[in-house]
Image: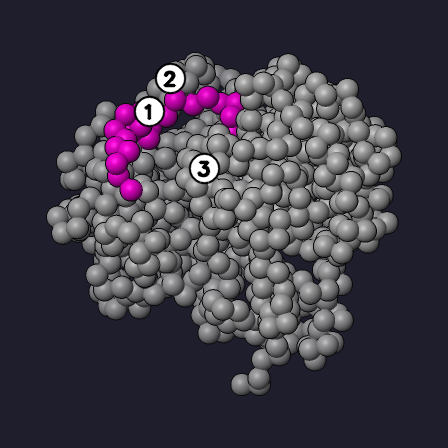
Amino acid sequence: MNQLVRPPNVTIATSACPHDCPSTCALEVEVLDGRSIGRVRGAEDNLYTAGVICAKVARYAERIHHPDRLLHPLIRTGPKGSGQFAPISWDDALDLTAEKLIAAEARHGSEAVWPYYYAGTMGLIMRDGINRLRHAKKYTGFHSTICVNPAWTGFIAGTGKLAGPDPREMARSDLVVIWGTNPVNTQVNVMTHAIRARKERGAKIVAIDIYQNGTMQQADLAVLVRPGTDGALACAVMHCLFRDGFADREYLEKYTDAPRELEEHVRTRSPEWAARITGCPVETIEAFARLVAENKRTYFRLGYGFGRSRNGTTNMHAASCIAAVRGSWALEGGGAFHNNGAIYHWNKTITEGLDAVDPSIRTLDQSRIGPILVGEPDALANGVPVTALFIQNTNPVSVAPEQDKVKRGFARDDLFVCVHEQFMTETALMADVVLPATMFMEHDDLYQGGGHQYIQLGLKLIDPPGECWSNHDVVCALAKRLGAEHPGFHMTPRELIDRLLGDSGWGTLADLEAKKWIDAQPDFDTAHYTKGFAWPDGKFRFKPDWKTVPFRSPWLAGPVDDMPALPDHWEVIEEATEEFPFRLGTSPARNFLNSTFNETPTSIAREKRPTVMIHPEDAAAHGIADGDKVVLGNVRGEVRIHAKIFDGVRRGVLIAESIWPNKAYEDGKGINTLTGADAIAPYGGAAFHDNRVWVRKAALS
Ligand code: SF4
């Protein structure tokens, strides 16, 4: 731990933000004594974080010292979901959990047990260790889909690899395009570097989104589109670049696969065509295209948001294609960036137990936990029912799509659920056994930046409260009771970090402790693909073979055969109809991060209550006034929520910032009641911003 002692009795310690946000900010934490923290700040000497973090993590003391933290193991004593629990010892809780998992395995085989987790912590030790238990025990596999698959696949489809120009280069751009992400809320560092470019170079900032969020308000040009229409916008920009002579033909010939086909294809994708689809005026599309034309040094910072549509993969790919048409990749401060996942070359054999993988064991789709738990045969891969869940770092009873099915599934009497959590989340409330979990400053872990290029340490700074255990400790204790064998179960987190670093070519834990972080940024030529893109022929793909895009878990899903060959607007979204005339997006709220932080008083006070934004003319047409209670509905259910009249959405579009717990809604039905669990092509994903709904003013109760 790298520490600098400051009076009076405050130690400043280094850490890293573990939350599900690409910024993975380098932190400086005031440690007040062995058990508590004060203010949290961004590390000034980390060149990406550059001293800036979001407000919700700056006030982390409110979360880590929250009076509602789970402190002791609990066993359910009343009906499921009743909230009736009694304390139980750790030994008894783990014995019972192991007994139930063994019983489930004895009845239906090992695939009846489903270890389920996600990104409540992004630490490579605490998040991923559950996979070691899964592999060692041959439990059902976990196809991780809920967040990244469409966006990652769409980006990789062009470049061949999930990596791009150094994110710090945004500060050296002439134009920064922030597309489908709202860094004013989360991953705040994007704004740091973009605003630096504006101040130091006179760069312009373009923001593209489905509502006038904080980032759009700070942009020089805000491009407001309907949800799921980004591919049309991208095609129109490419149309203008070819039309006006700003396509870099030399670059296209040397570095891309089908430039002439693309040019011919986008000839009909005019701004007028795109305006009809996106709802964005022709003048705005032309203005955006002109900025890209005039500024070859354009940095496209492509976010996750626009991947969360049924055509999200093709939208991401289309956006990344603009940088290839303009030849922006060749310049410092130019190109397209989404995530740096491919630069770290981790060998996770020890942490995830990859040497114990049995490929014959089925894998189930994380996003389809609702259909899986209610026993839909296709969701279960026509296999045995899931009768036991062991859950860490995720809260599907708030965040998973098709909530009605999720809740019905969790209520099953024949389903055993153990949840290891920090708070009594809505998922923990449905559990049979609840185990108290540490937070990131209470255990040792290792992190990688998705939105940057640092490997960072977050070592234990304070003792955990009560009887909280780390994920690693729980996984190892269960492994012992279950007879699961793997060397990783006999190592400490520090030993695992050291081994993971060493196996992956990043040195030792001691080195990293001395340096605080590792700058893993590849050299310019690699990051900008100047010697060719990461395909055998070195060519950027305008025409990807969607079924063979290299991805961590190639699992074909969704209407893969219908995917467009070239960048386009793919009409696979839940388009509005007469019966369902609105398109609903469920964008992230500023003070929450998924369902994390929706337990802290300041976040709740600032977010106030669940609301849905509606255009003033749509509101008037439906007799809805600001603050009215309205009902949103579709084939998946109904949600009661308060209306917020807002002219920063297109007509026919509704935005409900989330994720509030279900219990924050009048009848306990949260916004994910309306979202679908059907898979996004080609490798799965949940279309959180792609829902057609009707809206009406709620009857007075
Ligand atoms: S911006 Fe993201 S990574 Fe940085 S502190 Fe906030 S949540 Fe954590």
Query: Which residue is drawn at the image coordinates 64% and 32% (left, top)?
Result: 542
* Picture layout, residue 563 above or below residue 166: below
* Left or right: 7, with 255 as reference point: left
Q: Label 1 to label 2, Cα distance in Å?
A: 9 Å
> Disc 3 designates what residue?
122
Q: Which residues are magenta?
A: 341-362
Residue 599 visible in image: no
Q: How is the image coloured?
A: one colour
Q: Amino acid at mark 1?
A: Thr
Residue 673 visible in image: yes
Label 3 lies in ligand 1 vicinity (Cβ under 8 Å)? no
Does the CB distance between marks 1 and 2 fall below 8 Å?
yes
Question: How far from the left and from the top, in percent, is residue 169?
Answer: 70, 25
Magenta stretch contains residue 683: no
> Disc 1 designates what residue?
349
Magenta stretch contains residue 344: yes
Give the camera-side residue of 36 and 649.
649
Query: Which residue is drawn at the image coordinates 46% and 41% (left, top)?
Result: 683
Q: Nearer the viewer, mark 3 or mark 1?
A: 1
> Disc 2 designates what residue?
503
Does the CB distance between marks 2 and 3 fall below 8 Å?
no
Give the camera-side residue of 321 and 620.
321
Looking at marks 2 and 3 on the same chain, the residue that comes earlier in the sequence is marked by: 3
Label 1 lies in ligand 1 vicinity (Cβ under 8 Å)? no
Q: Label 2 to label 3, Cα distance in Å?
A: 20 Å
